[in-house]
Image (tube, coloured by chain):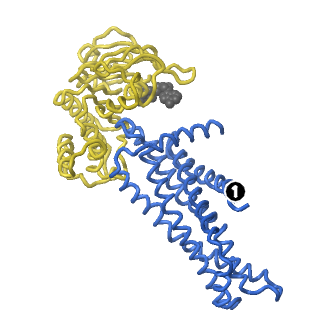
Chain colours: A blue, B yellow
Amino acid sequence: MIFELGRYILLMFRVFRKPEKWSVFRSQFLVEINNLGLESLGIVAIISVFMGAVVAIQTSYNIDSPLIPLTMVGFTTRQSVILEFSPTIISLILAGKIGSRIASEIGTMRVTEQIDALEVMGINPANYLILPKLTAAVFINPFIIILSIGFALVGGWLVALLTHLVTTHDYITGIRYDFDSYTIIYALIKTVFFAFLITTIAGYKGFFTRGGALEVGDASTKAVVWSCIFIILFNLILTQILLS
Amino acid sequence: MIEVLNISKSFGNKQVLNDVSMQFEKGKTNLIIGQSGSGKTVLMKCLVGLMPVDQGKIMFDGRSFHEMSFRKQKEIRKEIGMLFQGGALFDSLTVEENVIFPLTMFTAQSEEEKRERANFCLQRVNLKNSNHLYPSELSGGMIKRVAIARAIAMNPPYLFCDEPNSGLDPITSGVIDELISELTEEFQMTTVVNTHDMNSVIRIGDKVFFINDGRLWWEGDKHQVLYSDNEELNDFVFATELTRRLKAN
Ligand SMILES: Nc1ncnc2c1ncn2[C@@H]1O[C@H](COP(=O)(O)OP(=O)(O)OP(=O)(O)O)[C@@H](O)[C@H]1O
Ligand SMILES: [Mg+2]
């Protein structure tokens, strides 16, 4: 564990270097924005809509006292989606989707000697392979999370509309009630941290793969497991720091 | 010229290379032969700087690789072309893009110039009309040829090949061997080739080094290799039925 941490930190020193050529970096960055960001939009949209819907139903189910106004449904949905569901749950989903992709891509390059080939050419492979993915995810994930929040609120509203638990008017009023923009900032800070964790842990696992196809699969599983664990851990730490 | 001076390398307490010294001359194809597990790949990885050595020096025309600053090492790396055992082509890039890759990274050439150079290299290895295929669409022999084209794209003074014809049929092996040998002469490269194929040895071995048990056991050329009185070398050279029969005649 200490060994892994040390090796991870040393790898990060190699990742954060000036790219060999900015024009190459820029095109890699754009490719990764597409691969890691835009291609995740579909699944994020679906999960967010359903998540928002479920939160809305659960909240209205829990409100049985006539003293609590039904606007609470919109309010609670908004709060839980912004504070926790979108940044954390979606990041966990992305850990599965982009974490496994990164680890298997880099792991395959390792076991087929493509990383050695880069190194022999005089290219820093850690920087060349990991930095574009890292910067792309850190850049695009906040947008994805904002969209996810939007989709989740729409999901809650659809439920309100279809089940008549609350009126659209009440729901919207709830969403707009006592809005604190700091919660959005908190969500985005978490998102950026999680994007960093996912890409670097997956990059690390891929980079140090040894063996063959079996080990690549193993690296990609471990990348997902460890990203999830660290996301949960940092979720606690960041929440303590930012919200208390 | 590359000089290897007394290098040793071990993993844990397993000594893989033991006080090995050799000289690889310019314009010559230098072969390193030895049994599987004798340390050929480890030696080559030390030569190109993929692995640190425990002891000893490697001099590229008088410049000691392992004693250099990182920046200087990078300069030497740009002078090294390497052909990996499995080709190590970038599988997200097409054939042409693979060959262009080092040019993009290290030169300021225009797209036009790069494409011209890539096509020259691809023609040189007899690969035509495959520019837009991906590595997964190539045969083993084609992969090796693209890898050679990529290795020579930067016009390197040093060329390293790890088992260039493993997994190829005898005819294709011959073609690859000839290609390496021709390119070495044509561009006056210092070429080092790992192999355990005796055909390559007698065909292109300007200089032959036999590694056994982590030590340099024997050195000579393709003519001498068949007539040495070194027991271990003879065991290796005449290990196949074919060579044994030839010897009997
Ligand atoms: N990274 C490593 N860690 C530990 N031991 C290693 C490592 N790389 C190679 N070895 C050991 O070094 C020895 C020499 O291996 P090497 O790959 O150089 O053999 P080789 O001569 O290239 O064989 P082959 O002809 O099969 O390719 C082997 O016993 C191998 O187990
Ligand atoms: Mg080998």
Kindly indicate the quadrant of the structure image that contains residue A232.
Answer: bottom right
Instruction: Tell me the quarter of the image containing the N terminus of chain B.
Output: top left
Residue B114 in view in this figure: yes
Where in the figure is residue A35, as x and y percent of width and height? 44, 61
Residue flagged by tag 1: what amino acid is it? Ile
Q: Is residue B128 above or below residue A162?
A: above
Residue at 23% from the left image edge and 22% from the top image edge? B26
Where in the figure is residue A88, as x and y percent of width and height? 63, 63
Relative depth, front residue between B238 and A159: A159
Relative depth, front residue between B17 and A116: A116
Relative horizontal placement of residue A114, taking residue A219 as reference (left or right): left
Relative horizontal placement of residue A18, taking residue B157 as reference (left or right): right
Where in the figure is residue B148, as x and y percent of width and height? 27, 38
Q: Check the residue under mark 1 and report the chain it is in.
A: A
Q: Is residue B184 above or below residue A132?
A: above
Kindly indicate the quadrant of the structure image that contains residue A77.
Answer: bottom right
Q: Which residue is mark 1?
A: A241
